[in-house]
Image: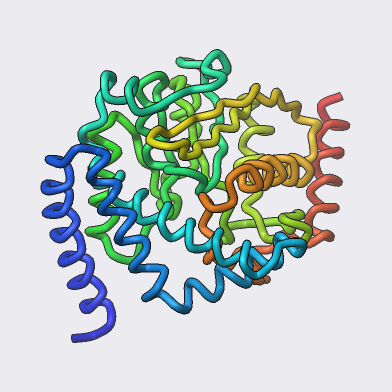
């Protein structure tokens, strides 16, 4: 069996396993399901040594004033949190308006703009899938999805979101740009996760004191369309998920997309500092991708072309 075939076979098996697990988990009380997730996370802390080591290195670099004991406690809590997050995602089909009111709290709901095309920005903080489901109950929501290698896994995630009324756009599709513009024109919140190093046009902006490649597309889209940017963050607070919706950022075509990307990244960093154990520290955030990096000369050329365009309009 060649590599693509093995990968597809693995995806089909994982898809079926997740469907079976979800059918079991959905029948459990949420508190009991989370307890199972906590156990799974603790097992991951012991078993996933490579991920644990990378996470320890990353958190120590981000918080140089911390002792090794503090770093270790944070990463152990991160594994516990991610275990609960996984089980919560399997439990998510149960989330209706009544259950959401009982399990989820909001701060800044007045900052949502249902029916107006907006750009939502967040990171892998708290339970981002739960947060998307809760927001979709209050505003039309479209998410840009970075497809996995296994098509069946993409199908599972799409199905999960579609059942909650969330539209998914495949970032790698040829129609992605057109679909994003359509979503904004139709009054949807178009949401991005901006805290990871991915194969997309990116710029280096500060993240915990170090330059990190960060996608510039969301900032450019906001400047092109004039859509307000709404930053939304979720965090686990005891037995509930708390969702903070910050005041919208109103952009201007004259704004610098690099500076805007840096500001949004700083907001994500601030959220991570609030609850560092609820972020994915094993991610290789500082990996170099020269092919996708927008160099300083490219930035300067972009500014020059933009200035020329303004002069022609005059």
Residue 96, percent from left and from top: 25, 25
Asked whether 34 or 7 is in front, the reply is 34
Q: On the rendered image, what quadrant is the C terminus found in? A: top right
Residue 48's image quarter?
bottom left
* Above or below, 83 relative to 149: above
The answer to whether residue 205 is left or right of residue 55 is right
Asked whether 48 or 112 is in front, the reply is 48
Render colour scheme: rainbow
* Above or below, 247 relative to 214: above
Image point (29%, 29%), residue name: 165
* Above or below, 5 relative to 314: below
Residue 120, percent from left and from top: 54, 33
Image point (45%, 78%), residue name: 49
Asked whether 217 or 48 is in front, the reply is 48
The answer to whether residue 94 is left or right of residue 219 is left
The answer, for residue 302, to whether it is visible in the render is: yes
Residue 119, percent from left and from top: 56, 31
Image point (49%, 72%), residue name: 52
Residue at the bottom extreme, as displayed: 1
Q: On the rendered image, what quadrant is the N terminus found in? A: bottom left
The answer, for residue 199, to whether it is visible in the render is: no
Residue 313's image quarter?
top right
Asked whether 306 or 165 is in front, the reply is 165
Residue 90, percent from left and from top: 24, 47
Image point (72%, 60%), residue name: 63
């Amino acid at each position: 069996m060649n590599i693509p075939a093995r990968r597809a076979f693995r995806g089909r098996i994982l898809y079926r396993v997740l469907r079976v697990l979800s059918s079991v988990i959905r029948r459990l009380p949420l508190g009991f399901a989370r307890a199972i997730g906590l156990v799974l996370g603790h097992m991951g802390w012991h078993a996933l040594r490579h991920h644990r080591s990378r996470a320890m290195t990353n958190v120590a670099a981000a918080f140089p004033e911390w002792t090794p004991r503090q770093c270790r406690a944070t990463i152990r809590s991160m594994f516990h949190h991610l275990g609960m997050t996984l089980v919560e995602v399997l439990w998510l089909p149960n989330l209706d308006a009544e259950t959401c009111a009982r399990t989820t709290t909001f701060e800044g709901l007045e900052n949502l703009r249902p029916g107006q095309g907006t750009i939502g920005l967040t990171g892998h903080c708290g339970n981002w899938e739960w947060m998307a489901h809760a927001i979709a109950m209050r505003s039309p929501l479209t998410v840009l999805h970075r497809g996995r290698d296994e098509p069946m896994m993409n199908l599972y995630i799409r199905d999960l979101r579609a059942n909650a009324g969330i539209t998914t756009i495949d970032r790698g599709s040829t129609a992605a740009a057109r679909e994003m513009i359509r979503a904004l024109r139709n009054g949807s919140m178009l949401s991005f996760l901006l805290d990871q190093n991915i194969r997309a046009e990116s710029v280096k902006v500060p993240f915990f004191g170090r330059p990190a490649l960060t996608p510039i597309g969301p900032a450019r889209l906001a400047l092109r369309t004039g859509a307000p940017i709404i930053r939304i963050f979720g965090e686990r607070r005891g037995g509930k998920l708390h969702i903070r919706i910050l005041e919208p950022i109103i952009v201007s075509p004259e704004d610098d997309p690099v500076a805007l990307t840096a500001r949004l990244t700083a907001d994500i960093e601030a959220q991570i500092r609030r609850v560092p154990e609820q972020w994915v520290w094993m991610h290789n955030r500082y990996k170099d991708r020269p092919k996708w990096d927008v160099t300083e000369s490219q930035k300067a050329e972009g500014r020059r072309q933009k200035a020329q365009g303004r002069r022609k309009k005059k």
